[in-house]
Image (tube, coloured by chain):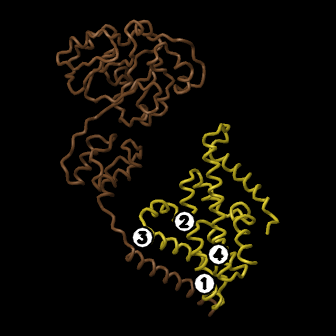
Amino acid sequence: MENLIKPILVTGGLGLLFGVLLSIASKVFAVVIDPKIGAVLDALPGANCGACGFPGCEGLATAIAEGRAPVNACPIGGQKVADNVADIMGLQGANVERNVAAVLCQGDNEKANIKYKYEGINDCRIQMQVSDGCKSCTYGCLGCGTCFNVCPFDAIEMVNGVAVIKKDKCTACMKCIDICPKKIIELVPYDNKYVVKCKSEDPGKVVRANCSIGCIGCKICVKNCPVDAFTFENNLAKIDYEKCINCGICAEKCPTKCITIHENKAVVEV
Amino acid sequence: MNLFTILISTIFVNNYVFARFLGICPFFGVSTKMETATGMGIAVTFVITISSILTWAIDKYILTLLGVEYLQTIIFILVIASLVQFVELVIRKISPTLYSAMGVFLPLITTNCIVLGVAILNVKQGNSLLQTITTGVGASLGFFLALILLSGVREKLELADVPKALEGFPIAVIAAGLMSMAFLGFNGLV
């Protein structure tokens, strides 16, 4: 009988002892954690994409709860998440301007000329190393789909050798912007319809020789814009999105049609 | 065995990872980056040292006295698990910085077989308290060394041109195997 009771007592006794010690320790060494952190974390999308610049959603939740980040700091959550977070933090919802990425090049396989035929590893960053890529225009999209591969939201498609952003799927996580070796992907406001889809700073003559849909620097858009939303720098027209009223006159007048509607192409095609 | 011999033996000759093949799971799990490897190494060193002292005392003053040495394994697991919990609580309170560096790895150590292995081998060999502590420190330093070495190699491998089939984990296993063979060279040192 003793052989049976002894191990039970020893194991049970030690277990009880450690249990009591741990529960005391958990009271003595209790750390007060702000309950807001958990609530904010629940409200965030939880994708841990890092687009906000903090280490994961938990990092952002801590920062918001401590007041180090604004309630609308989550770029992919948009207005809905910002409102929820603002509720938790007891603030009035801050307006979030939704941005989407836009590929500022339309020089596809027909419209843009090429210097040589590239047959190598299918990655724009590698093609860049072979005399700045195969396109005659040094600013043009190389069309290898490096941005397509990096997009976590399936918001990019490759159409005839040019990357096209599906506006509604884009969450402005900036992954494509960071990876594009040509730096031709930029954020534009979601509500803005018209975008100058060309980045070429070459003089008009050179642009015309390289591509049929580039900005040739004719300044017709600048002259015709009713609200003076255009600026002209380095042979390239640029829209001030704050001033733009989406009237569409520029796109109508543009001789090369490089000013165009930035929209959800995939939806239009379906 | 004098203490110095024990130290050299546990770090190099009978390295717990390379010669005894204990603690392989955390060895591969957290050796992808030097930073996490260091965190894990420090946490393991800390836990093994304390747990070997505690298990030694419990074995000597409770289990042996009552004649229930056969309960060693289960009691040691209990001790280690409680200890890890306790250490986690204390660190979180005392040093949040250390906690965020080491905190994630602490629960993992509960199931790290090196900790149990050291505790049981100590008792089996009938070590004195000083010998026990030295074994504990040596074993954890050996693990630390193995972790740092592998993570250094893996960081380099990240940039190397590895055949597609071997990318990631497989090449790490090969590297670890080669290291284990290299550590055989220490045989006969003690």
Residue on which the image places disc 3:
B94
Q: Is residue A197 above or below residue B15?
A: above
**Residue beneath disc 4:** B119
Mark 2 nearby-residue class (10 Å; few <14, some 14–19, many ≥20): many
Question: Amino acid under label 1?
Answer: Ala
| Residue drawn at point x = 51 percent, y = 12 percent | A114
| Residue A126 in the image: above or below residue B187 | above
Is B161 situated above or below B46? above
The label number, if any, that marks residue A188 in the structure image: none
- Mark 4 on the same chain as mark 1: yes
Is there CB contact under 8 Å for labels 1 and 3? no
**The residue tagged with tag 4: helix, strand or loop?**
helix
Q: Residues within 10 Å of mark 3 (few under 14, many from 20)?
A: few
For the residues labelled 2 and 4, the Cα–Cα distance comes to: 17 Å
Q: Are marks 4 and 3 on the same chain?
A: yes
Q: Which chain is brown?
A: A
For mark 2, what is the residue? Answer: B43
- Is residue A145 toward the left or the right of residue A80 in the image? right
The first of marks 3 and 2 along the sequence is: 2
Name the residue type under label 4.
Answer: Ala
